[in-house]
Image: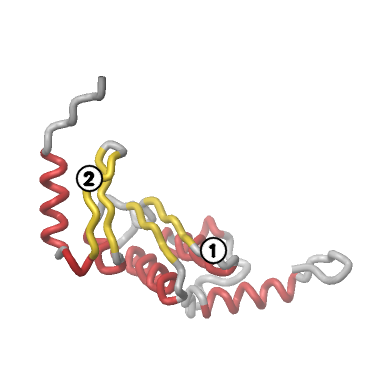
Amino acid sequence: MTDHIGFFQLDRAKKETNRMMKELLGFTGGGVLPDSAVRTLSGGERQGIAIGRAMYFKADLVILDEPTRALSVKEVGKVLDFIKKVKDSGKSCIYISHTIANIYSVSDRFVILDRGRVVGRYNRKQISEPDLNEVLIQIHHAPEPEPAS
């Protein structure tokens, strides 16, 4: 945020960051402040900041690749809450994961890839979480396809 001459307006930027952290991300505690160094944040808070940046800059699509890997259960919950906010704002999110238990509740559709090929497409209304897990197990145990000659 700069003024008409191009000078950075630090106070204005901090106020906007604080607003964004509260409204977009739901950071209400005192542990995360506009001056907080990202390296001091938890994994879930870091993912939230990344998602918040995408929302702030009005991205129509947010792509998350294994955003909950190596996070605690509490931190996974934070990331899923951020994803719900993305959806509630009318934006789209592609969530890449190997953990169906984390993504099932926040997903509308599932596309299953195996060795770079699409091997399944499902709407959440069409398939339960246990049935989706069973599909994944069957795909995992299927023999590898013969290479094209």
- The single residue placed furthest to the front in the displayed view is 149
Residue depicted at x 27% and y 61%:
102
Q: Amino acid at mark 1?
A: Ala
Which quadrant holds residue 18?
bottom right
How much space separates mark 1 and mark 2, taking CA atoms? 29 Å
Q: Please tell me the numbered disc located at residue 119.
A: 2
Which residue is pictured at 11% across the width and 59% down the height?
A: 131
Q: Can you say which quadrant of the picture contains the N terminus?
A: bottom right
18 left or right of 28 in image = right
Q: Nearer the viewer, residue 132 or 146?
A: 146
Q: Nearer the viewer, residue 44 or 139?
A: 139
Lateral position of residue 35 relative to residue 50, left or right? right
Percent position of residue 32, x then y:
52, 71
Residue 59: mark in rendering:
1
Task: Report crowding for label 2: few under 14, some 14 to 19, many 20 or more residues within 10 A (C-alpha).
Answer: few
User: Does residue 29 sit above or below 50 in this rendering?
Assistant: below
Question: What residue do we see at 57% from left, 75% from top?
Answer: 20
Q: Position of residue 50 (x, y in %)?
A: 51, 60
Q: What is the quadrant of the C terminus in the image?
A: top left
